[in-house]
Image (cartoon, rainbow, N blue to C red):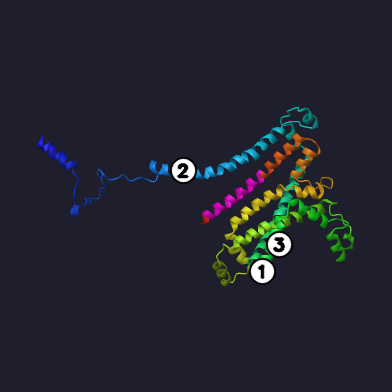
Amino acid sequence: MAVQLDDAVEQTAPRIGKGGAPPDDGAPSARRAPHSPARRTPHSPARRTLRSPARRAPYLLLLPALIATAVFLGWPMVRNALLSFQNLNMKELIQHLTDWRGTGNYQEILGSDQFWRVTLRTVVFTGVNVTLIMVLGVLIGLLLARLGKKMRLTLSVALVLAWAMPVIAATTVFQWLFDSRYGVVNWVLDKLGWHAMADYDWVGTQLSTFFVITVLIVWQSLPFVALNLYAATTTIPKELYEAARMDGAGTWKVFTSVTFPFLKPFFLATTFLEVIWVFKAFPQIFAINQGGPDRLTETLPIYAFTEGVGNLHFGMGAAISLLTIVVLLAMTAYYLRLTIRQEQQEEDAL
């Protein structure tokens, strides 16, 4: 019995090395001291409990915006989707009748040549406007970065005033400018020697009407791109420009090797926002000539309004508006796919 007790004491007693420290025999200790606290891993329950409120905080802050979006955007979208499956004309609207048509509205729209012509026209119109907005906006933004303080302030104030002008007010001004009889544009062209432009009707043909609308939309969109680009250029270290110029880089080389790579996320995000803004442009086109002449300048938003409200085919208009959203989502998804692919390629290159 005594021998067994001695063996048990030797097995349970901690071994003491030199200086009172545990001996280092190369093997990890299988036991901890009775009163030593256990080491907690990053994934321990206690740490997870402490972090869970912080993880929930962003979602709680987003909750009011999500609720407002669901109420003011989600519910009208649901109602619009229900209307798109109905044959809702003035008769059904007055008598409060619900005439379900199923997918008949969509079949009629997708089977018409008018819808596809308007869709192609909208895509081309958006591409031309966004290209002009981005090119001119970048040039003005770079100009702001090179001007002195007084000239930069003057140009910035002019851009802000143009940006702050309401859409309908700006459209009315452009209607006056391009008026066939009393317009300033025709008067200036006549004084410069183009006497045939003295009474030119700018909204009489498809091309000239689109020209006026494009000038209006580009003029309204330039301040957003230019001011944001100038603000973004202030974050680029000046040492990068100095190093590029010391290497003999010109203006174009400095832009392609320093400015554009550094501000690439800005260009991608701004282009994405401009595509959405131009694609859904409604008041400028409608106020200039209501999609005329002969409905040749109709884009998808104008087409949906004309069929729905103008021709009193509310179910048809609802279906066209939903198809417009689908087309915009398809363009957006394709653009985001290209953006993500480029970012992955950059990460792989690094």
Of helix, strand and loop, which one carries label 3? Answer: helix
Of helix, strand and loop, which one carries label 2? Answer: helix
What distance separates the C-alpha of mark 3 from that of mark 1?
A: 13 Å
Position of residue 116 measured from the top left corner of the image (x, y, whole percent): 75, 42
Q: Residues within 10 Å of mark 1 (few under 14, many from 20)?
A: few
Q: Residue at x 67, y 56 (%)?
A: 224
Q: Which mark is residue 53?
A: 2
CB under 8 Å between callouts 3 and 1? no
**Which residues fall within the magenta stretch?**
329-347
Of helix, strand and loop, which one carries label 1? Answer: helix
Q: Which mark is residue 178?
A: none
Tell me which amino acid carries mark 1: Lys
Q: Residue at x 71, y 29 (%)?
A: 102
Position of residue 290 measured from the top left corner of the image (x, y, whole percent): 81, 46
Residue at the disc numbered 3: 158
Position of residue 292 measured from the top left corner of the image (x, y, whole percent): 82, 47
Q: Which mark is residue 150?
A: 1
The quarter of the displayed image where residue 266 is located = bottom right
The quarter of the displayed image where residue 62 is located = top right
What distance separates the C-alpha of mark 2 from that of mark 3?
A: 47 Å
Tell me which amino acid carries mark 2: Pro
Given residues 228 and 84, the one toward you in this image is 228
CB under 8 Å between callouts 2 and 3? no
What distance separates the C-alpha of mark 1 from that of mark 2?
A: 50 Å
Tell me which amino acid carries mark 3: Ala
